[in-house]
Amino acid sequence: MQLQKLERKDIEKLLPYFQNQRTHISNYSAGSLFMWNKYLSTMYAEEEGCLVLCDRYVGNRYFYWPLSKDGDAAAEERVAEKIEKFCRENYIRLHFTAVPRERLSGLVMRYGSEVHVSDIRKWRDYLYNAQDFIQYPGGKYSGQRNHVNKFKKGNPDYTFARYTVADRAETEAFLREIAKVQTEKEETLAAEEMRGVFEILPKMEELGLFGGILRAGGEMVAFSVGEYCGDMLVVHIEKAKRGVAGAYPTVAQLFAKEYCNERTKYINREDDSGDAGLRKSKLQ
């Protein structure tokens, strides 16, 4: 197995792996790789119709579970053995990350007492039923409906539209305002995320990404970006203007209504990276 550095120009040819993936894990997506590959020094290889990804985090190498383009579980197992051999030959401690739930028991059986499994709270994806976001049904979502109704009542002229190349200058200006708030956190991950947001805009079409813009009074107040991965819609970016009540739940719902199709069963809104405010919002 020969690992090579993942360049952003390489991601386009890997799209078939992500578009057909069944893991329900957002790491296996073009948007995630594009935005974070520099920070994580991602490397990759293709073996037996499987994609091997490897990140560097806190000084260690972490291999994603091999992802078969065709859902071939046997091929994934064979490639996992190649990862073992690679680590053994290069004196690298074996770490797997982003392991699909259905593969976990096999790893435990394979390594027995040698395996240590961790499930770090801040890196868990938030996976929702798509229809819940489209409808905000029942008492469970009464808070979201109230926020949306408040936004619509206060902004009767609101509009939602698909993002196009013609919107890029306006979107960048909007994001620069958002970035001022982000940098107030003085957190590396927040700064890295905003860098990725700006850099992904000119590459959206070739990466299979799509966006949505919420406006009120003719002014952009929220922006979202996502992509299709199997039967889920992954939301990579969701930004709203501070002080506009209800903008976040409104853009989340309208984005789902616009882009969820007959194949979309789930919406993956990625992790909360340990941010208390983001966690509260995503749990709600």
Image (cartoon, rainbow, N blue to C red):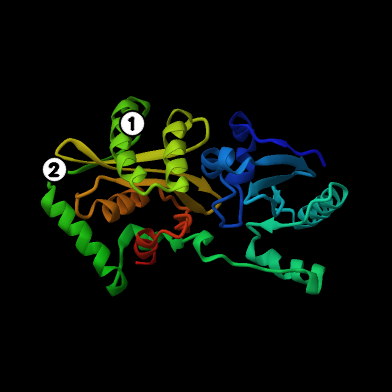
Under mark 2, the amino acid is Asp
Asked whether, in this view, residue 10 is left or right of residue 172, the answer is right
Counting from the top left corner in percent of width and height, residue 262 is at 45, 53
The residue shown at (28%, 35%) is: 174
SS assignment at label 1:
helix
Instruction: Determine whether, in the image, residue 268 is placed left or right of residue 88.
Output: left
CB atoms at circles 2 and 1 under 8 Å apart? no
Residue 35 x/y as whole percent: 51, 40
Residue at the front extreme of this rendering: 186
Depth-wise, is mark 2 or mark 1 nearer the camera? 1
Nearest the camera: 34 or 166?
34
- Residue 268 vs residue 136: left or right? right
Q: Residue at x 75, y 68 (%)?
A: 115
Secondary element type, mark 2: loop
Q: Hey, which quadrant is residue 280 in on the image?
A: bottom left
How far apart are labels 2 and 1 at the CA level? 23 Å
Give the image location of residue 66, x and y in percent: 72, 51
Type of the residue with mark 1: Glu
Query: Which label belongs to residue 208?
Result: none
The x and y percentages for residue 274 are 45, 60
Residue, x 80% and y 73% (percent of image)? Answer: 112
Tell me the residue that label 2 is attached to. 157
Is the C terminus in the top left, top right, bottom left or bottom right quadrant?
Answer: bottom left
In the picture, which quadrant includes the N terminus? top right
Q: Residue at x 52, y 34 (%)?
A: 207
Residue that label 1 marks: 172
Residue 269 lies in quadrant: bottom left
Q: Residues within 10 Å of mark 2 (few under 14, many from 20)?
A: few
